[in-house]
Amino acid sequence: MIARMNKSILLFLTILLYPFTLVQGAESFTHVASVTFEDVAGYRKTRLFKTSAAKCESDLRIVQKQLEAQIGIASIVSAKCGEVSYLAGFFNKQPMGVPYIVDGKRDVLILPGAPQNVCDNLAQLLQRTSPDAQCIMP
């Protein structure tokens, strides 16, 4: 079980190591590109990326392509754009009922069912390339 979790940690670490570049200017981040995917071990995860209404579809395609290129991703379960309002708690680092990793101000990886140590260890690994990566537990 632990070996399986460690394998999953490494798979999802690679997903978060490719952060998006921040958009310059006064663009308003009112939307979220949301992609739910399943890994080869059968775990479902959701990646959220805060973006603007104008760029949401484009960013959604980028997130999908990044996930499809990752080893260990079995399938994309759903992909959609939506308003950020009902997901704002994730980006504000509030407890949301599931463990998740906040990587920067615009990228979140939801880890349903992950224990505290898995979430913490993944956040520590991410901090090597993104110092503000943080595990948030329910």
Image (tube, helix red, strand yellow):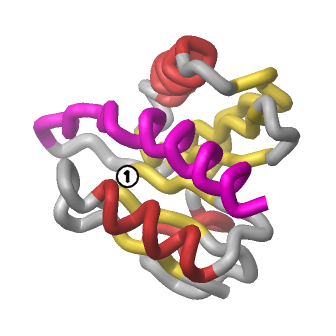
Position of 136 relative to 46 (above/below): below
> Quadrant of residue 102 in the image?
bottom left
Q: Residue at (56%, 47%) from the top-left corner? A: 48
> Quadrant of residue 128 in the image?
bottom left
How many numbered discs, if any?
1
Q: Nearer the viewer, residue 28 or 15?
A: 15
Q: Nearer the viewer, residue 69 or 48?
A: 69
Quadrant location, the N terminus: bottom right
Position of 117 relative to 132 (above/below): below
Q: Secondary structure at mark 1?
A: loop
Q: Residue at (69%, 25%) from the top-left corner? A: 73
Q: Residue at (56%, 45%) from the top-left corner? A: 32
Q: Nearer the viewer, residue 112 or 80?
A: 112
Which stretch appears magenta?
A: 1-25
Picture coordinates of residue 49, whole percent (x, y): 48, 44
Give the prevailing secondary structure in the magenta stretch.
helix
Picture coordinates of residue 37, whole percent (x, y): 75, 34
Q: Is residue 61 visible?
A: no
Picture coordinates of residue 124, whole percent (x, y): 33, 67
Q: Nearer the viewer, residue 9 or 27?
A: 9
For this view, does 70 lie left or right of residue 104?
right
The stretch drawn in magenta includes residue 52: no
Q: What residue is pinned by disc 1?
A: 106
The stretch drawn in magenta includes residue 22: yes
For this view, does 122 lie left or right of residue 90?
left
For disc 1, the neighbor class at 10 Å (few under 14, some 14 to 19, many from 20) is some
Picture coordinates of residue 34, whole percent (x, y): 65, 40
Q: Mark 1: which amino acid?
A: Arg
